[in-house]
Image: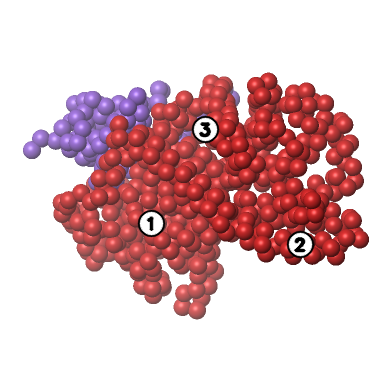
Chain colours: A purple, B red
Amino acid sequence: MVSLLEAKKDVPLVVKAVIAGGGGGRGRGRRRGGRRSESRMVGLNWCRRFSNMGIREGAVIRKVSVQPFSGPVIIRIGNCEIAIGRGMASSILVEEVKD
Amino acid sequence: MKKILLFGNPNVGKSAIFARLTGVRVIVSNYPGTTVEYLSGKTRIGGEDIKVIDVPGTYSLDPDSPAEKVAKKFLDKSNPKDTVIFNVIDSTNLERNLNLTLQLLSTRFPVMILLNFWDETKHKGITIDVEKLSEILKVRVIPTVAITGYGIQELREEFANAVPSDFDAKGKDTWNAVGKIIKETQSIKHHHHTFLQVLEEISTHPVMGMVFAVIVLFLSFAVIRLIGEGLIGFVFEPAFENLWSPVLLKFSGVLNNYKFLHKILIGELINGKIDFYQSFGVLSTGLFIPIVAVLPYIISFYLVLSILEDTGYLPRLAVVLDRLMHQIGIHGMGIVPMFLAFGCNVPGVLATRIMETRRERFIVATLMSISIPCMAKIAMVFGLLGKYGIRGIAPVFVTLFLVLVVVGKIMSRFVSGESPEIFTEIPPYRVPYFRGLFKKVWLRVGWFLKEALPFVLIGVLIIDLFYIFGVVGFLSEFFGPVLTKILGLPAEAVAALIVGFLRKDVAIGMLAPLGLSMGQLVTASVVLSMYFPCAATFVVLFKELGFRDTLKASIIMVVAAFFVGWILNLIY
């Protein structure tokens, strides 16, 4: 099991786990500097956004390309390409599909 | 009135269906998030008026972004008795789309499913058993191709038969349920890569992607300039000089005894002739600026932008530029509102809603108002400084670009809040549908004429009145010394700064009769671009950012504009 960042390109990978990230888990309603931490609410709550797009345990995905200088990673799931940041990519654990 | 809610994932063609049903002309593009606010229209089905609402795209009913919150609100507000949900699905992405479908089915609203992009399934070797899908989900399923209108008639006929489904995925894992449905209804054949897919690979390739982006951007600007100058030089300017000018000259003779009216309508005659850049009457320069100097560039820009939008290149550009954009505190998708801002800052500011956090929206909106000149400004800069060639034009745009980088760097450091990483779907490349493309360009050009033309005429009128009643003289005396000392501009340029609050193209046009040197023109153009947004942009900034952030953005603009203007003055 490796993170998507280290995984091989252009081979089918099965998602083993998606680690909840963003430091301190779900921060909904948590206050910081008097204002609710917004990216906790919408941006870094990508665990749920992943699952809404079908990236969940057991899903088969492919790493299509990795942009240079720690740019985004493009993955393909079904017929759909999704670009995600490296932080997100490193929290998706995958394994090569063996048949 | 009964109503239809169009629900679906981003970029599945909801707006195209909406336009088909209602005849309301809306912007349709090939990237997620084109529609950030709902659109509402009416259609007639079976002799009955029915309200149609185009809901922003959403992946699920958990509101994760501002657009999705709007979507959720609509569902909460509606009554299942008089509401039908049209769930628009991208047939080439059935699996991902069905997640939302199952959630919608469990709301107990009557649902119809539209398998949009039906034509693309064939090219992609996808077969979907429509009957079977309908049987499993217990609702009507209708294949559609929104841009050609395929399936829309059937949609109207079947509308009355829409029922709530008793398919229940609640309690079960939705994705498992989706997986089962897919197994029973969809089969995919392997197929060879098409030319478009090869292009897709190149344009996000780690190395080639950058090269591709540079080529696309260079070509875009070259084409914009070529078409813009072509239209001005061969169509609009000759038409004005040969047809409109003689009419105005005759009219000028009639008005000879009415100095006041002459000054306002025709302006000053230069050597007994009308000089459209310098006369400054409402009917001379007032019409010339929007129609001859600016409109051709608006047409050519929107043509190029629409092609980039409809092919699906913009999200790929966002991926390629993501790293660079993070340097100024936003992720790659920030390129989309910025690109729109080159046409006009107003839609640019509205499009900042595709960014997730307040910090990002503030940064993008401020950066574009300060350093992205809209086509109207660009066209006027070309018009004024074009005679000096690249030596005159380049300093303006290079300066604005440096401002973008520096102000962006500073803001990314000091604006509080967070900037998440990029997270976006990348749609497949599509060949633009030309009728749709031209409709879209026409729609946007129409907006320009409707929104801009009156303001330009009013702007010119105000200037004339200012001159006639000596307001300019008074203001020049008052603010002139500041202007002269800091920016090295003549005191009269203060009038341009004032009109700039209304329209920037008129303001830049006002520099023409002042007889400025090239350096002064460069300084004035840059300062006029930066110091404050025009009235229309200010209003949307205020709506989108609220009072405090608009105030902050305005302060940044004024300070930066005068600082940069001072530096330019030192250089020239």
- The quarter in which the N terminus of chain B is drawn is bottom right
Crowdedness of circle 3 by 10 Å Cα count: few (<14), some, many (20+)?
many
Can you say whether B200 is above or below B119 in the image?
above
**Distance Cα–Cα, label 1 vs label 2:** 42 Å
Q: Residue at coordinates 85% horizontally, 57% vertically from top-left?
A: B262
- The residue to which callout 1 is attached is B432
Read off the chain for label 3.
B
Image position, residue B390 (x, y; %): 55, 35
Image position, residue B448 (x, y; %): 61, 54
Crowdedness of circle 2 by 10 Å Cα count: few (<14), some, many (20+)?
some
Mark positioned earlier in the residue sequence (1 or 2): 2
What SS does tag 3 mark?
A: helix
Tag in front: 2 or 3: 2
Q: Is residue B173 visible?
A: no
Image position, residue B520 (x, y; %): 70, 31
**What's under tag 2, amino acid-wise?**
Leu
**What's under tag 1, amino acid-wise?**
Pro
Can you say whether B3 is above or below B494 in the image?
below
Read off the chain for label 1.
B
> Are circles 1 and 2 on residues that touch, CB within 8 Å?
no
> Mark 2 vs mark 3: same chain?
yes
Read off the chain for label 2.
B
**What's under tag 3, amino acid-wise?**
Glu
- The residue to which callout 3 is attached is B360
What SS does tag 2 mark?
A: helix
Q: Quick one: B485 or B18, which is closer to the camera?
A: B485
Mark positioned earlier in the residue sequence (1 or 3): 3
- The residue to which callout 2 is attached is B248
